[in-house]
Amino acid sequence: MKTLIIYTSQTGFTKKYAEWLKERTEGDLLELKAAQKKDASFFEEYDAIAYGGWAMAGNVVKSKWFLDKATAWKGKRLALFCVGGCPNAGKEVDVMLQNLLSEEQKQYMQAFYCQGGFNYDKMNAASKLALKMFIGTIKKKKDATEDEKKMVELISSSYDISDISFTDPIVEYLKG
């Protein structure tokens, strides 16, 4: 089965997962900007195509291109994966995964989440500002839950909780 992994990465976590997926599926790897320049015939040779971006505000960054193209690729194994700073075993992750794809898209594609981390040194100014605002909002909450307090503590500085094992379900799905 010929597999293509397409990704975009801001701080390196999604790139790390894309590279792991490439190795484990023996597939090809392409950054989103390069994929966007390819014509439709380029993708015909692939049996499985995965797109990865980072999770932000309940969405996968820059996934619109992939989701739009995916309607023409319904006969292939399609996966949308995202990488974020929350641990995999979180209620927020389950909710996000349920809402990433429409009911129609769920018929021909699966969504996955991989815990990654934060690297403030590589983050753009807008992302840093959004996170600082989010952290400030949670800190000011009088009724913040224990989970919210733990999340604020975790995302207040750079960290890496990525692990190749989180690619297992994606690899299994792509290989069919």
Image: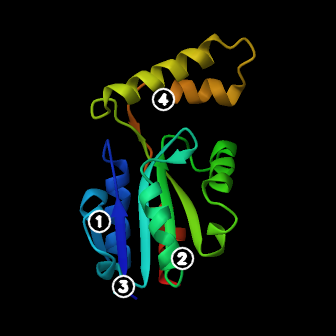
Residue 72 placement (x, y as % from top left): 48, 77
Q: Residues within 10 Å of mark 3 (few under 14, many from 20)?
A: few
Q: Residues within 10 Å of mark 4 (few under 14, many from 20)?
A: some
Q: Which residue is mark 4?
A: 155
Q: Is residue 163 visible?
A: no
Q: Earlier in the sequence, mark 2 or mark 3?
A: 3
Labelled pair 4, 1 in contact (Cβ < 8 Å): no
Q: Is residue 148 visible?
A: yes
| Helix, strand or loop at mark 4 | helix
Q: Nearer the viewer, mark 4 or mark 2?
A: 2
Q: Residues within 10 Å of mark 1 (few under 14, many from 20)?
A: some
Q: Which residue is mark 3?
A: 44
The alpha-carbon separation of the residues under discs 1 and 3 comes to 13 Å
Q: Amino acid at mark 3?
A: Glu
| Mark linked to residue 139 | none
| Residue at the right extreme, as displayed | 143
Q: How is the image coloured?
A: rainbow
